[in-house]
């Protein structure tokens, strides 16, 4: 994975008023720590930060942080606080890393090809579009490519079906489903429910048999005849 360089200014004071002042000048308050590095508050240019975080690597970009002209420190932007409405960064945590230490990264999945089941009328149903990988910072893949062209109707691909990459591990459950091809909902016919009356079961109110009503009428007529006789 390629690395980008980002210049930073150190020695800023902390606190909300100072953070607001920094943002008004087109910069972003930040902090760097980790891997034996003492926590330091810094300031980075908002435009330069935007460029650093919008490479193909995205949030997994390796950033060489140059603080006040010192020797670059290899970092990653692990905590990024963005404004809820505007496209701007409010604060960033840079974490120093080592090229010799395996770390966990979230990598996008690129689906390649058209499944056989989709060609036959099925529906492509992705369960996830990213996957966690455990690897060195120097071997982080920009993405994981998954060939789905052989998937038929009703079949799925799982974590265990992802391609094996040098130095890359998939820590998630190997049985976890990534994508599947499902039958269109319109083709799923619902079977009518059969209502079976058990012997001795009471008939719901309002659903008495017609014979019962006739019996009541006949009984009433018999009473009238007896009365007249």
Image (cartoon, grey):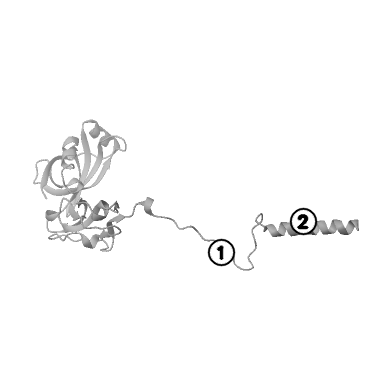
- Name the residue at the right extreme: 229
In this view, the mark in front (2 or 1): 2
Quarter of the figure with the C terminus: bottom right
Q: Residue at x 71, y 59 (%)?
A: 212
Residue at mark 1: 196
Spatial CA distance of label 2 from label 1 is 29 Å
Secondary structure of the residue carrying numbered label 2: helix
Q: Residue at x 39, y 55 (%)?
A: 188
Mark yes or no: residue 201 visible: yes
Q: Nearer the viewer, residue 150 or 126?
A: 150
- In the picture, the disc for residue 116 is none
Say above or below: 175 vs 67: below
Secondary structure of the residue carrying numbered label 1: loop
- Name the residue at the bottom extreme: 199
Residue at mark 2: 217
- Is residue 194 shown left or right of residue 19? right
């Amino acid at each position: 994975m390629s690395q980008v360089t980002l210049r930073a200014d150190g020695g800023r004071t902390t606190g909300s008023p100072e953070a607001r002042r920094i943002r008004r000048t087109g910069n972003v308050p930040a902090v760097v720590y980790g891997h034996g590095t003492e926590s330091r508050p810094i300031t980075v240019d908002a435009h330069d930060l935007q460029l650093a975080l919008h490479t193909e690597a995205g949030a997994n970009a390796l950033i060489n942080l140059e603080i006040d002209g010192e020797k670059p420190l290899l970092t990653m932007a692990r905590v990024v606080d963005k404004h809820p409405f505007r496209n701007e960064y409010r604060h960033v945590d840079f974490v120093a890393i080592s090229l010799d230490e395996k770390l966990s990264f979230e990598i996008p999945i690129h689906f390649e090809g058209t499944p056989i089941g989709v060609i036959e009328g099925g529906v492509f149903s992705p369960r996830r579009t990213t996957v966690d990988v455990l690897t060195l910072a120097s071997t982080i893949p920009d993405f994981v490519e998954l060939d789905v062209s052989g998937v038929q109707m009703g079949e799925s691909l799982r974590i265990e079906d992802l391609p094996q990459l040098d130095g890359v591990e998939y820590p998630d459950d190997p049985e976890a489903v990534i994508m599947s091809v499902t039958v269109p909902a319109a083709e799923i016919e619902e079977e009518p429910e059969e209502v079976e009356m058990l012997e001795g079961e009471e008939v719901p109110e309002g659903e008495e048999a017609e014979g019962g009503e006739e019996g009541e009428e006949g009984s009433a007529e018999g009473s009238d005849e007896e009365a007249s006789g």
